[in-house]
Image (cartoon, helix red, strand yellow):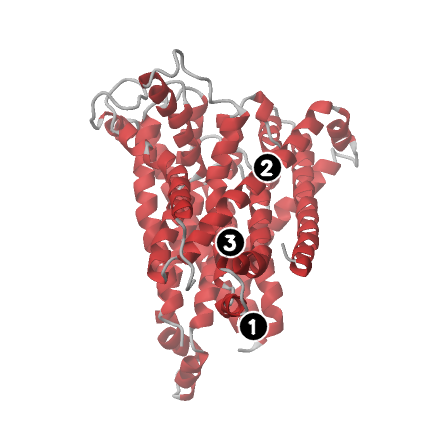
Amino acid sequence: MKLRPILWLLLPAAVLLAGFILAPSLDLFRASLFDPDFTMQHFQRLVDRGVYLDVMWRTIRVSLIVAVLCTVIGYPVAFFINLQPSRRQTLLLFLILIPMWMSILIRTYAWIVVLGRDGLVNQALAALGLAQEPVQMLFTSGAVLAAMVQILLPIQILTCYAAMTEIDFDLIRAARVLGARPRQAIARVFVPLSLDGTLTGLVIVFMLSMGFFITPALLGGRQDTMIANLIEFQVQRLNWSFAAALGVVLLVLTVAMIVLLRGAGRLLARRVLKGGL
Amino acid sequence: MQGLKASWGLTAYFWLIVIYMIFPVLIVIPVSFGNSEFLRFPPESFGLRWYRAYVSDPVWVAATVTSFRVAVLSTVIATTAGTLAGLAISRSPRRAQGPLTYAATVPIVIPHIFIALGVFILALRLKLTDNEVALAFAHAAVAMPFVVLITSAAIRQIDPTIERAARVLGAGPVRAFRVATLPPLIPAVVAAAIFAFFVSFDELIIAQFLMKGSETLPMRIWADLRLDISPVVAAVSGLLIVVTTIAMACAETLRRRALRTLAP
């Protein structure tokens, strides 16, 4: 195909992204730095107040915990699906996909139904005589973590699964022929080969966690506020410039952490591949 | 994987995790059929009380209609722009394909709250807040990368020689495309459109920032969950869980079919 028709076909997408992603992003940077003259006061305020630093640190910490939990929990699940005959694999994948399709708002609401004062868990505890009074589970960090992991787990499972299907089984067979036990073949051939895809999944989950808004707002308490919640709060109070500064910081932190995680992961992967497990 | 079998422990573990992922969603459905004043589990009696409350409340109905309108417009925009871009990418020089795909899918990496805030601040300056069309375009920008990924993957499976053959046999470029490339592409486009629809229909934050006068369904649910949790949310959620599952299962099946049957 000639170049000119290709450019015409790209035009609507380019206009859409330029108008509704690129221009707003640039305007956000502008709003964070010009109020109306150039100023660093909004970033200064961010650094000066310990509360805001706490929120940023918590956002990174929670996102890391969620990413690691999703990886540790999700990897064996993906491995299990990979062991099944291919027809059953499709069926099992649908089980993973169904919760993933649900909106985050509804999945978070579902956790209110499960963990609320008159929720499922409290009803069960009361029926079993294990608790006299309803246990406070909503508005705790534990509730936020349980829900965030549940919401993001399908993404990590699917990424791990995709990486595992790429692995050439002849390599496993070769290891077996050369005398490796099944466990050894998995630990020394299969796991190192799936490491890169698993790391990609971890980074994706981390990235998505950084922007989480609905779940900490509905299931967490004041102590669970994340950057996105802070942004919404500042928008409500009409502090748009400060909200913009927070948005810029969120984006920069996310990108910086992704680079860091990928770098650390590569280093780890190289070590594992060289030395075995 | 041949020669390896999942142990009993791994099988049990798998089903445990599936329950963890699906159970909290499924439990909403029986709860939504409860008949009592408050949310309770197990419901003391079953009935359609909260579904009736949902469809007879003009506020909820208006929010649903608004969401539907925005999502349809957004789907049309995202699917058109995304499919054309997918076509362009798959037909461009091999060297350019990687960077182009990267550029078209970059919005996936940006946190929604960042996009929402940017769109809101820009809309404030351009006096475009509270504008459903602007909201639909913003949703389309967020959904379009998924359309590009789905359609370009399907186009790659289509044999370009068929279209070339049509050209050799005298068809013009548009006709050749319509006859040779479009028919096998349609399932992927439909799948992409369904995905795009739900990206918009479920989106909360951009709408929350941009809209003041009218309200979308996620905004209504959000407002309700923040104040007092009325069981109407259970009915709406129950309905959405069923509808989303059916629609997305269709989309996923179509997407898979587009990838499978077209392979040479």
Q: Nearer the viewer, residue B78 or B110?
A: B110
Give neighbour class at mark 3: few <14, some 14-19, many 20+ (Cα, 10 Å). Answer: many
Q: Amino acid at mark 1?
A: Ser
Is any part of residue B216 visible from this angle?
no
Q: Chain of mark 3?
A: A
* Residue A154 locus on image (x, y percent): 46, 46
Distance between mark 3 and mark 2 Cα atoms:
18 Å
Reading the image, the residue beneath label 2 is A65
Residue under the image location 75 percent in, 37 percent down: A33
Distance between mark 3 and mark 1 Cα atoms:
30 Å
Q: Amino acid at mark 2?
A: Ile
Left or right placement of residue B151 versus residue B230 in this view = right
Confirm or deny contact between disc 3 and disc 2 (CB under 8 A): no
SS for callout 2: helix
- Determine if marks 3 and 1 fall on one subunit: no
* Residue B210 locus on image (x, y percent): 52, 36
* Residue B158 locus on image (x, y percent): 42, 74
Q: Nearer the viewer, residue B20 or B62?
A: B20
Q: Chain of mark 1?
A: B
Distance between mark 2 and mark 1 Cα atoms:
41 Å
Left or right placement of residue A38 versus residue A221 in this view = right
What number is the disc on residue B92? 1
Q: Amino acid at mark 3?
A: Cys
- How many numbered marks are there? 3
Q: Nearer the viewer, mark 2 or mark 1?
A: 2
What number is the disc on residue A160? 3
